[in-house]
Amino acid sequence: MTKNEVNIVKNSVLDSTEAYVEARLSVLDFVRTQIGVVQGEPVKGTDRKYRHVVKCNATSNTSGITYNNVLSVGNIPFPKNSVVFLIAPNAQFSNQFILGKLDDTPCNISAGSIRLGGNNENDAPIYLSGTQLSDGSYGHIASFKIMPTRLYFADGAAISYVQPTQFRISQFVSGYRVSMMMDGSNARIAINTEADPDGGLIVSKAQGWYDNGEFYNPLLNDYTWVKPDAIESKTNIGTYTVGASAFKFLAQSQNYGLERLRISLNSDGTTITFRDITNNTSASLNMS
């Protein structure tokens, strides 16, 4: 064989070998991986999937390759400048997806946020942020904002909050205010029932609530009702109120020694006896 014929055979063998290897590789099951950087914030489509723009293989001398509409495992939105790890099944880069993030992920509270339900952070039932938001909170649970030292709820003039040593529940409706506060630091519970005739502290046997969440009316059973100006009690023997006059009498009894005075009525109801138990003296009044 001539040298030219030898070269032809050699090149044919190399070409056929290369073609065979490429054909086999094209049908093999394997994945290609690469690392990229998210460009801009992810966009949520009508199918509720987050789509990212990711740039890979960028260097100081090359602009790299940009991939659009890249999905992520778990439909996690990865913020701008996130360094992400991508996988392309069967080396099909048009079907590649983000497997995860190489730095702190959005589900790490120190680096991102968690949203449960809703379409955005405002209408989500639960939204937790790793950084402080513009309103000073770190997200919310239902209508309660998560402030640095308390759970806080505000609806117009009504304010409720819970913190380590205090809580406050307020209601402002129809021109009156009701507010209950527990102050653990000063060991006290205060109730403000300004302009509300039904306000106060009620201890009742009618404890609980209906299926719609409203409380039972506590006045439908035996109760003791502490009002700003009186104490009212209902039992099986009737309903009685201890008001300002009764408190005045008790105060005078204590201040002027009336605690020593005992008053008794004889069996037929005709004689009232007043006795000073300290001096053991008595006086009687005949009612007949």
Image: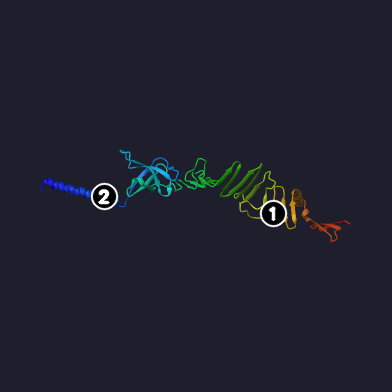
Check if mark 1's residue and mark 2's residue have beta carbons within 8 Å.
Answer: no
Q: Nearer the viewer, residue 121 or 168?
A: 121
- Left or right, 50 with respect to 151, comes to left
Residue that appears at 78% across and 56% down: 260
Residue that appears at 77% across and 55% down: 259
Q: Is residue 205 above or below residue 44?
A: below
Label 2 residue SS? helix
Q: Which residue is mark 1?
A: 220
Residue that appears at 21% across and 49% down: 16
Q: Pinpoint residue 288: horizontal percent, then vertical percent.
A: 89, 57
Q: Residues within 10 Å of mark 2 (few under 14, many from 20)?
A: few
Q: Nearer the viewer, mark 1 or mark 2?
A: 2
Q: Pinpoint residue 11: horizontal percent, then vertical percent.
A: 17, 47
For marks 1 and 2, the one nearer the N-term is 2
- Left or right, 122 with respect to 55, comes to right
Q: Residues within 10 Å of mark 1 (few under 14, many from 20)?
A: few
Task: Report, in whole angstroms, how far the alpha carbon at label 1 lies from the one at label 2.
Answer: 86 Å
Q: Mark 2 belongs to which amino acid?
A: Ala
Q: Which residue is mark 2?
A: 23
Colour basis:
rainbow
Q: Nearer the viewer, residue 149 or 69?
A: 69
Label 1 residue SS? helix
Residue most extreme to the right = 288
